[in-house]
Amino acid sequence: MSKKSSRRSALKNMALGTTGVALGMTALACKDQGEKPLAEAKEPQDQPLKGNINHSVCYWCYNSFTIEDFSKEVARLGMPAIDLLTPAQWKVAAKQGIKCAVGTESFADIQNGFNVGANHSRLQQQYEGLIKEAAKDGVPNVIVFSGNRRELTDEEGWETCVKGLKPLADIAESEGVTLIMELLNSKVDHKDYQNDHTLWGVELCKRLGSDNFKLLYDIYHMQIMEGDVIRTIKEHHPYIAHYHTGGVPGRNEINTSQELYYPAIMKAIVETGFKGYVAQEFIPTYKDKIAALKEGVQICDV
């Protein structure tokens, strides 16, 4: 499986089972492996989380676990939430006291999104149901995508996305749910994706003019595309409702094997007054994947 398709395929496959039956690591083991850390994770000593960051984690990175077992591990680490769950999956997580921070479904397609008018009728119908189900179950965010550029100009992309998203933003507002469009890199992982720079996404937010449409700022992706992470967060935080992490290069652990210094980034996020979730979204390379997750959470727990 190619690097650019692994996350998309993983999310679609997870939607097929109500309990997130383990899919094996074949789809993810070949994605974004990058440089391996010099040593396996040393189990971080237990310490209570500080409470300044609301920690979450993307299930697709750990889908060798069933959603039930993974929810138990997340609860054991003191984390409150998991990202990118379908309604069937978030109901299982809820039984373990774990919230879903971002809801999704199999129709949430990175390549085929709201920048193509022909997609609007179908996506509006599908997302309306997902938004209402998220509202019913207390899921605060639902993920959407711009789609691939396919030679569209920025202006054409903005105009078409606004037309497709405005009715859904109104529904989201009435239901108390926020639509979040993810910023993804088009250089390494998602070739031709249109919402690949912060300023493009910010302009879309401004044109929609809804407090219930914001950005998912993926730190890994935006480091690849534009860098300048802390200044960007400080300047544009009013348009950001959610964050993802990941080591650069490779999208593996966020320790010293990669170039970003996450404690400083987390401190900058806290200083903006952010009260949403920060989700770990790296592919663990350690044999003990939960130890890798625990390490990432503690690095970010400023």
Image (cartoon, grey):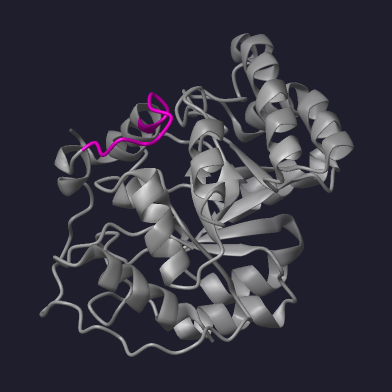
The residue lying furthest to the front in this view is 95
Q: Residue at x 27, y 82 (%)?
A: 256
Q: Quadrant of residue 268?
A: bottom right
Q: Residue at x 69, y 22 (%)?
A: 129
Q: Residue at x 41, y 82 (%)?
A: 299
Q: Which image quarter is the C terminus in?
A: bottom right
Q: Position of residue 144 (x, y in %)?
A: 60, 35
Q: Is residue 166 visible?
A: yes
Horizontally, is 73 left or right of 24 in the view? right
Please state the total of marks drawn on the protein image: 0
The residue lying furthest to the right in this view is 174
Which residues make up the magenta segment? Answer: 14-23
| Of the pair 241 and 91, the residue shown nearer to us | 91
Q: Residue at x 62, y 11 (%)?
A: 122
Q: Quadrant of residue 164?
A: top right
In the image, residue 273 above or below residue 124: below
Q: Which image quarter is the N terminus in?
A: top left
Mostly what secondary structure, the magenta segment? loop
| Of the pair 279 and 162, the residue shown nearer to us | 279
Q: Position of residue 211 (x, y in %)?
A: 84, 48
Q: Quadrant of residue 243?
A: bottom right
Q: Is residue 16 magenta?
A: yes
Q: Position of residue 52 (x, y in %)?
A: 63, 81
Q: Position of residue 62 (x, y in %)?
A: 31, 52
Q: Is residue 121 magenta?
A: no
Horizontally, is 240 left or right of 66 in the view? right
| Of the pair 141 and 201, the residue shown nearer to us | 141
